[in-house]
């Protein structure tokens, strides 16, 4: 079964000199985890995203579509990256999600991908 592991963190965690050091440390941990998951044949894709200041959202409503600057969700955390993995079950996906490095206050959402028979 394939799962998306969506990484949400407050962008403010990476601001300033201390934030830059934190980002360097966390990226190194992501690289090590990704290398391990790829070698084991678990990771099928993944990557980090640029900051929310680069986001654009297409909103559909009232039979029309409009384009807005910024992310759609009004949250304290922003989607910063993802892993696409293939494992046997949710328990395995959760075990990997717990290993994903995030800043204080960060979250990892685990969601199964739809299958053809869903």
Image (tube, rainbow, N blue to C red):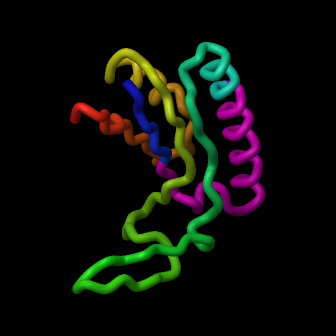
The quadrant in which the C terminus is found is top left
Viewer-side residue, 73 vs 46: 46
Residue 59 placement (x, y as % from top left): 36, 77
- Verify whether residue 29 appears in magenta: yes
How many labels sit on residues? 0
Main SS of the magenta part reads helix
Residue 115 placement (x, y as % from top left): 31, 34
The part of the image, by quadrant, that contains residue 13 is: bottom right
Left or right of 22, for residue 13: left
Residue at x 70% of width, y 46% of height: 22
The part of the image, by quadrant, that contains residue 64 is: bottom left
Left or right of 87, for residue 41: right
Q: Which stretch is magenta?
A: 8-32
Residue at x 40% of width, y 85% of height: 66
Residue 65 placement (x, y as % from top left): 36, 83
Rendered position, 72 above or below 18:
below
- Verify whether residue 107 appears in magenta: no
The quadrant in which the N terminus is found is top left
Left or right of 99, for residue 32: right
Rendered position, 69 above or below 99:
below
Viewer-side residue, 97 vs 66: 66
Left or right of 85, for residue 73: left
Residue at x 32% of width, y 23% of height: 90
Rendered position, 114 above or below 67:
above
Outermost residue, front direction?
Answer: 116
Rendered position, 63 above or below 53:
below
Residue 72 placement (x, y as % from top left): 40, 71
Residue at x 54% of width, y 32% of height: 100
């Amino acid at each position: 079964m394939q799962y998306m592991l969506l990484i949400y963190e407050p962008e403010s965690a990476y601001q300033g000199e201390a934030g830059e050091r934190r980002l360097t440390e966390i990226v190194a941990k992501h690289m090590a985890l990704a290398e391990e998951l790829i070698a084991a044949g678990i990771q099928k894709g993944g990557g980090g995203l640029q900051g929310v200041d680069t986001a654009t959202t297409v909103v559909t409503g009232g039979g029309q579509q409009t384009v807005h600057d910024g992310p759609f969700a009004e949250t304290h955390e922003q989607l910063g990256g993802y892993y696409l993995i293939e494992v046997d079950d949710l328990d395995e996906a959760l075990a990997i999600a717990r290993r994903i490095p995030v800043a204080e206050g960060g979250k990892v959402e685990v969601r199964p991908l739809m299958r053809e028979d869903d």
